[in-house]
Image: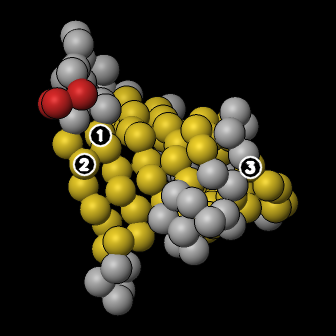
């Protein structure tokens, strides 16, 4: 299957104040062909925004950082992430990410069920 850029839908997630906290471009509406694929997306985290700490159960998540600079909490250990960094959050562990830069933090997110 092939998906063209024109077919990719981008959705804004709003925070409690109604501001855009994330932009998610879903690259993976192939779930009927790959049921273990929960997410394959290009994610944009605006300046100053963050993804709160959360634990993955029954699935793992990987980020591939494309641009920007962030503070990644890897199950309690904080690390700076920049373009080219790859993260892995296995099932049963947690993570968070905060944009520390002065530009949007962009990354590919992949979530696969166990």
Which callout, 1 or 3, points to the residue nearer the camera? 3
Tell which circle, 3 or 2, labels the residue nearer the N-terminal end. 2
Residue to which mark 3 is pinned: 81
Quarter where residue 54 is shown: bottom right
- Distance, label 3 to label 2, CA atoms, is 24 Å
Q: Residues within 10 Å of mark 2 (few under 14, many from 20)?
A: some
Q: Which mark is residue 38?
A: none
Residue to which mark 2 is pinned: 10
The reply to whether residue 66 is in sight is yes
Location of residue 90 with respect to 51 vertically, above or below: above
Quarter where residue 36 is shown: top left
Left or right relative to 59: residue 28:
left
Tell which circle, 1 or 2, labels the residue nearer the N-terminal end. 2
Which callout, 1 or 2, points to the residue nearer the camera? 2
Dot 1 and dot 3 residues touching (CB under 8 Å): no
Residue to which mark 1 is pinned: 26
Measuring 24% from the left and 28% from the top, which residue is drawn there? Answer: 5
Left or right relative to 65: residue 23:
left
Element type where label 2 sits in the image: strand
Measuring 28% from the left and 62% from the top, which residue is drawn there? Answer: 12
Location of residue 46 with respect to 16 vertically, above or below: above
Location of residue 74 with respect to 30 vertically, above or below: below
Q: Residues within 10 Å of mark 1 (few under 14, many from 20)?
A: some
Element type where label 3 sits in the image: strand
Dot 1 and dot 2 residues touching (CB under 8 Å): yes
Quarter where residue 76 is shown: bottom right
The reply to whether residue 74 is in sight is no
- Distance, label 1 to label 2, CA atoms, is 7 Å
- Which x, y percent locates residue 64? 60, 36
């Amino acid at each position: 299957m092939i998906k063209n850029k024109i077919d990719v839908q981008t959705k804004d997630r709003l925070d409690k104040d109604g501001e855009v906290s994330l932009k998610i471009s879903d690259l993976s509406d192939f779930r009927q062909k790959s049921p273990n694929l929960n997410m394959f997306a290009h994610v944009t985290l605006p300046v100053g925004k963050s993804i709160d700490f959360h634990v993955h159960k029954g699935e793992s998540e990987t980020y591939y950082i494309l641009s920007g600079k962030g503070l990644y909490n890897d199950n309690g250990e904080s690390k700076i992430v920049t373009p080219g960094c790859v993260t892995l959050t296995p099932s049963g562990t947690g993570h968070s990410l905060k944009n520390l830069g002065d530009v949007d933090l962009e990354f590919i997110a992949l979530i696969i069920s166990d």
